[in-house]
Image: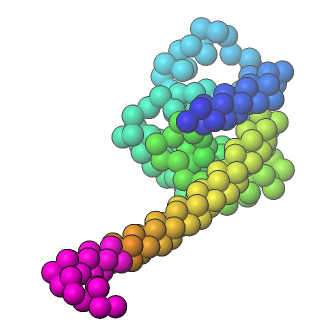
């Protein structure tokens, strides 16, 4: 459990470090005029602009299961409407891969993250996040595989131990039966 927290902290630190010197916004807002702080606050209140990926990760981890499911459904819908929407694919991959997600599934995240890692149109922020999440998902998959193997071995060892215990109990039963017979028939043990 402690290593899980350390991994989460290391991942958050790496994300913050990778994106610390990056500009806050990319895309259409830069092509138009720069918005003022008041208009940014209003746009966030009205949800016209989507938060940055780091904000999305931070906010998503705090959502309830139902709200996380709604976010995933919305991202999947937007992605299916526009298959080239890299932002939505990135959000889906984040939902499936971040530690705070209640919908975490590294097996679903890995192919998306692999596809996004090959994508040339990602911003530096997106590329850094995808790279970190991709490595984390791969490591999580490896660890889960090792855990399954260890659990299988432990189960096999438990079955062997149960079998040996059963044999030991049978031997003790035979020994008791022999002792009872020798006590009932003292001539039998002395005649040998």
Picture quadrant of residue 170 = bottom left
Q: How many labels does the image show?
A: 0
Residue drawn at 77 percent across, 34 percent down:
125
Residue drawn at 18 percent across, 85 percent down:
185
User: What main secondary structure does the magenta stretch of the protein show?
Assistant: helix
When the figure is inspected, residue 2 is found, relative to residue 165, above or below; the finding is above
Look at the image and tell me in which quarter the N terminus lies: top right
When the figure is inspected, residue 92 is found, relative to residue 100, above or below; the finding is below
Residue 68 lies left or right of residue 32; in this view the side is: left
Q: Depth check: give the residue in front, 9 or 95.
A: 9
Q: Depth check: give the residue in front, 25 or 56.
A: 56
Q: Depth check: give the residue in front, 57 or 184.
A: 184
When the figure is inspected, residue 147 is found, relative to residue 32, above or below; the finding is below
Residue 65 lies left or right of residue 112; in this view the side is: left
Residue 126 lies left or right of residue 54; in this view the side is: right
Residue 148 place in picture, x, y as percent: 56, 62
Residue 28 lies left or right of residue 49; in this view the side is: right
Residue 88 place in picture, x, y as percent: 61, 46
Look at the image and tell me in which quarter the C terminus lies: bottom left
Residue 173 falls within the magenta-colored stretch: yes
Residue extending farthest top: 38
Residue drawn at 74 percent across, 57 percent down:
114
* Residue 173 seen in render: no
Residue 77 place in picture, x, y as percent: 49, 52
Residues drawn in magenta: 170-192
Residue 190 falls within the magenta-colored stretch: yes
Residue drawn at 52 percent across, 63 percent down:
154
Question: What is the image's colouring?
Answer: rainbow
Q: Depth check: give the residue in front, 82 or 161.
A: 161
* Residue 99 seen in render: yes
């Amino acid at each position: 459990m402690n290593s899980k927290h350390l991994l989460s902290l290391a991942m958050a630190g790496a994300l913050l470090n990778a994106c610390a010197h990056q500009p806050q916004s990319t895309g259409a807002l830069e092509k138009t005029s720069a918005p003022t702080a008041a208009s940014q606050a209003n746009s966030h209140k009205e949800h016209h602009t989507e938060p940055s990926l780091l904000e999305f990760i931070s906010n998503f981890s705090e959502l309830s299961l139902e709200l996380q499911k709604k976010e995933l459904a919305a991202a999947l819908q937007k992605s299916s409407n526009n298959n080239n929407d890299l932002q939505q694919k990135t959000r889906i991959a984040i939902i499936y891969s971040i530690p705070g997600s209640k919908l975490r599934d590294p097996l679903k995240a890995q192919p998306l993250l692999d596809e996004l890692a090959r994508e040339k149109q990602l911003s530096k922020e997106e590329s850094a996040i995808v790279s970190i999440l991709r490595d984390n998902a791969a490591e999580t998959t490896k660890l889960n595989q090792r855990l399954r193997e260890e659990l299988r071995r432990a189960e096999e060892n438990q079955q062997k131990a149960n079998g040996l215990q059963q044999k030991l109990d049978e031997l003790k039963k035979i020994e008791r039966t022999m002792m009872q017979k020798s006590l009932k028939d003292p001539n039998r043990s002395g005649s040998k």
